Image (cartoon, rainbow, N blue to C red):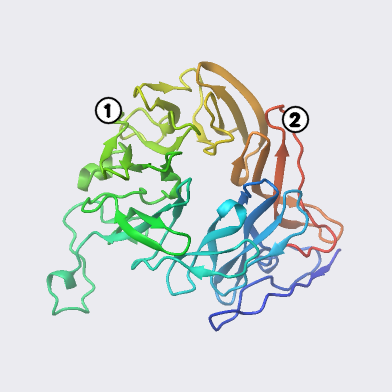
């Protein structure tokens, strides 16, 4: 039987006192994949291509069984997988990282100050500084195209506790429940997320506004909604967001969410999908701002309805179902300007017979669907451009040193337009030094 030893060295603690959870040493005996071996490998997630398409920013999470927790660090490497560099090393996880300032800086979330806040640093990891100090933390963010504004997600108080009604009983833990919804899975609904917009001068956030102030509704929608529920117009003057503006029993039974448009200058909100009765989610604008695309279900209350790909002409308000002649549900469409332009859009078909399919269609020919790629379904996250397909996936493969080896790889598919497929992945079967 084969045996091997993976030796790794964790980075040293910086900032707050405490051990940094990093790469863990592991011993593989008799080629057996134990829990300890599995948990020792890093989990790759969140790949983002730099504006000049020369580098990839991504995170790797490491587990510690004794502490029963994980820690996520940020890495940068060249687009071909070379010159990998770890750019953070802290006891707190860094998440939601994106390139800003033309690739010169990186924005991300960190709990270093005690709760999740927005930070920025240079592209090499230096000069990290906190730029948000929101009372209840920041749970997602999206820069405007001109980077003069930031939309971020923050929680607002929703329900009442016994201590709210009886201040002299400040240690009371009871809840006042007289309607739905009071719980999502294992989470009591005591707060709900709201979108905030702030001005950004490159150093700090100012003029922070809750764009749904006073509304008892969620955006993004619980329990699974995130920053994909928002989209800036290309001119940075307005924001589209998803919300199901219902409460109580009606909220618990309905799937009727809508796409709303908030104008920064007038502070007015318009319902763009009024009368469309199912889920309307994941808005995205074409690069010229003339079209809005989103995922839409037809029937209210039917969570398993076909997810259609809709598009709206922002000038005329005309709506069009691009998948009316398509038999299957669209899992997602790719929302960057490289995949959603003035005449076409690339989207992903929901898993079918264990495979994941990518299609290309045009607005003016809704019966035209071109299959541009088919691959195994086990993707974690993907970023598709017209010339690059970047993603991470779980991979099990054999190597010279381990009978079974589990890792996650970053891969790129070149020339999607030409439908030729080229994968590269930095898979190490000798040194095992990367993840």
Residue 19, image x and y in percent?
60, 80
Res 376 seen here:
yes
Q: Which residue occupies the foreground of this view, 177 or 278? A: 278
Q: Which residue occupies the foreground of this view, 83 or 347? A: 83
Which residue, as the protein is rendered here, is positioned at the far front?
201
Res 258 seen here:
no
Compared across the picture, whether 124 is left or right of 321 comes to right
Which residue, as the protein is rendered here, is positioned at the far bottom?
17
Residue 403, image x and y in percent?
81, 57
Mark 2 Cα within 10 Å, few/some/many (few <14, many 20+)?
Answer: few
Compared across the picture, whether 252 is left or right of 11 comes to left
Q: Split into 4 quadrants, where in the image is the N terminus?
A: bottom right
Compared across the picture, whether 233 is left or right of 372 comes to left
* Quarter where residue 237 is shown: top left
Image position of 3 with respect to 428: above or below: below
Q: Which residue occupies the foreground of this view, 344 or 157? A: 344
Q: Split into 4 quadrants, where in the image is the C terminus?
A: bottom right
Residue 8, image x and y in percent?
75, 72
Mark 1 Cα within 10 Å, few/some/many (few <14, many 20+)?
Answer: few
The residue at the point 59 percent across, 77 percent down is 66
Alpha carbons under labels 2 and 1: distance apart: 42 Å
Residue 115, image x and y in percent?
42, 70
Instruction: Mark 2 or mark 1: name the one nearer the start of the chain.
Output: 1
* SS under mark 1: loop
Q: Which mark is residue 237?
A: none
Q: Which residue is mark 2?
A: 420
Q: Which residue is mark 1?
A: 275
The residue at the point 42 percent across, 43 percent down is 236
């Amino acid at each position: 039987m084969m045996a091997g030893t993976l030796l790794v060295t964790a980075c040293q603690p910086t900032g707050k006192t405490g051990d940094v959870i990093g790469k863990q040493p592991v011993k593989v005996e008799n080629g057996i994949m134990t829990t300890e071996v599995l948990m020792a490998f890093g989990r790759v997630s969140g790949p983002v291509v730099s504006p000049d398409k020369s580098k990839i920013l991504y995170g790797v999470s490491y587990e510690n069984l004794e502490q029963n927790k994980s820690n996520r660090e940020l890495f940068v490497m060249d687009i071909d997988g070379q010159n990998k560099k770890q750019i953070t090393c802290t006891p707190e996880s860094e998440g939601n990282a994106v390139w800003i300032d033309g690739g010169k800086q990186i924005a991300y979330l960190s709990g270093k100050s005690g709760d999740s806040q927005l930070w920025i640093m240079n592209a090499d990891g230096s000069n990290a500084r906190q730029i948000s100090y929101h009372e209840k933390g920041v749970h997602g963010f999206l820069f405007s195209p001109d980077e003069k504004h930031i939309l971020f997600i923050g929680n607002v108080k929703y329900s009442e506790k016994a201590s709210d009604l009886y201040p002299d009983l400040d240690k009371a833990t009871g809840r006042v429940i007289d309607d739905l919804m009071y719980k999502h899975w294992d989470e009591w609904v005591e707060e709900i997320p709201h979108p905030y917009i702030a001005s950004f001068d490159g150093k700090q956030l100012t003029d922070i506004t809750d764009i749904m102030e006073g509304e008892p509704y969620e955006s993004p929608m619980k329990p699974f909604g995130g920053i994909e529920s928002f989209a800036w117009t290309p001119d940075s003057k307005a924001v589209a967001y998803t919300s199901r503006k219902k409460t109580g029993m009606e909220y618990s039974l309905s799937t009727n969410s809508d796409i709303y448009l908030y104008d920064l200058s007038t502070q007015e909100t318009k319902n763009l999908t009024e009368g469309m009765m199912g889920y309307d989610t994941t808005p995205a604008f074409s690069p010229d701002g003339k079209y809005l695309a989103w995922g839409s279900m037809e029937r209210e209350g039917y969570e398993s309805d076909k997810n259609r790909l809709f598009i709206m002409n922002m000038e005329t308000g005309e709506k069009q179902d691009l998948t009316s002649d398509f038999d299957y549900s669209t899992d997602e469409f790719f929302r960057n300007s490289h995949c959603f332009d003035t005449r076409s859009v690339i989207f992903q078909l929901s898993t079918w017979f264990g495979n994941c399919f990518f299609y290309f269609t045009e607005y003016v020919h809704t019966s035209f669907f071109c299959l541009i790629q088919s691959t195994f379904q086990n993707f974690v996250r993907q970023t598709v451009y017209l010339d690059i397909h970047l993603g991470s996936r779980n991979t099990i493969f054999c190597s010279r040193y381990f009978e079974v080896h589990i890792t996650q790889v970053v891969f790129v598919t070149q020339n999607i337009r030409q439908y030729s497929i080229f994968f590269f992945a930095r898979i190490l079967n000798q040194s095992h030094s990367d993840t």
